[in-house]
Image (cartoon, rainbow, N blue to C red):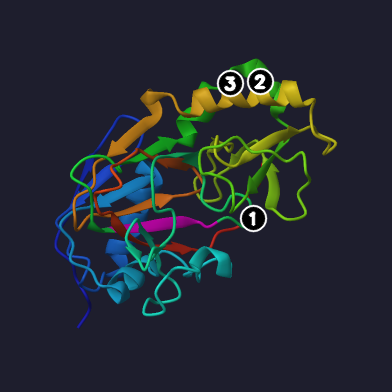
Amino acid sequence: MATTNPPFTITRLSPAIGAEVTGLDLTHELAPETVTALTDAWHEHIVLLFRGQTLDEDQQLAFAARFGTLVERGRPATRRHESADHDTSVTLVSNIRKDGKAIGSLPDGDMWFHHDTCYTENPCRASFLYAVEVPRTGGNTLFASSYAAYDAVPDELRDRLGACTALHVYDYDRPLNARLDIAGGLDSLRHFSHPVFTTHPKTGRKVLYVNRMMTARINGPDGDGLDAGESARILDRLYDIGEDPAHVYEHVWRPGDLIMWDNYCSMHGRTDFSPSETRLLRRCVIEGERPRA
């Protein structure tokens, strides 16, 4: 007998980005037509929220796998404090510590806006984050539409940067919200350059693809870095455009929330929260492709 799912409802969360899906229990198998409808809604809204879900790791992974190929966790350094009891495609995002060591990654404080794994040749296509335990206040996730950001870039800046790329860097030893310093070279740092303006491979829409946390400089059309001062000034303008509150949805987590977001056309950040409060979320990602202009 063919799988069928009940009708579901899509409700917009903000003018620029995000929608809540109600009426689906993600512990159940999804029919192909349901996956197609969700994919269409995802392409339209960028971020989809499913509240009140009770998912174990396998169920979360099975849902994510309907939208692409799962990626195993990153380089060993990112999982040095994680439990071996967890599937290799799952990352814990948590401030819980055992014997003084965090059980997951990115444990504390606020985080600047960023695109996941933009410092690699093929950044992840999408992320799926499930809330197990959350603080009473804070630790919210901010999602910004990179479509809306591109649309807001002045024409003169679009023309100037149309053939430029941006260098993205991840320094595992740098405090999350400290300015990148690449004066010492890039040999020990994960890095990759992508077009400043990319095209979404599914929707064909243009995207602003720079972020405050991981973008280190603007490269000119010939690949050489712009003057450091000029690059910094341009990036600050682009960051302000991308982080405009008009482009942002702030999600206040509840246990049982699952959010999936399109990493090609959004960036996200995190608000601060008390270190005395417990925060535990479970993350998995699916494979992506190299961004193109």
Asked if labels 2 and 3 touch by Cβ distance under 8 angstroms, the answer is yes
Location of residue 81 by image quarter: bottom left
Q: Is residue 133 above or below residue 136?
A: below
Q: Mark 1 points at which residue?
A: 120
Quadrant location of the N terminus?
Answer: bottom left
- Residues drawn in magenta: 124-130
Residue 237 circle label: 3
Q: Distance between the residues labelled 2 and 1?
A: 24 Å
Residue drawn at x 48%, y 34% is 147
Q: Which amino acid does label 1 sit on?
A: Thr
Residue 233 circle label: 2
Q: Distance between the residues labelled 3 and 2?
A: 6 Å
Residue drawn at x 30%, y 43% is 139
Location of residue 235 by image quarter: top right
Residue drawn at x 25%, y 72% is 56
Q: Earlier in the sequence, mark 2 or mark 1?
A: 1
Q: What residue type is labelled 3?
A: Arg
Asked if labels 1 and 2 touch by Cβ distance under 8 angstroms, the answer is no
Front of the two marks 2 and 1: 2
- Of the pair 207 and 168, the residue shown nearer to us: 168
Q: What element carries label 3?
A: helix
Q: Is residue 230 left or right of residue 72?
A: right
Instruction: Indicate yes or no whether the magenta region holds residue 129.
Output: yes
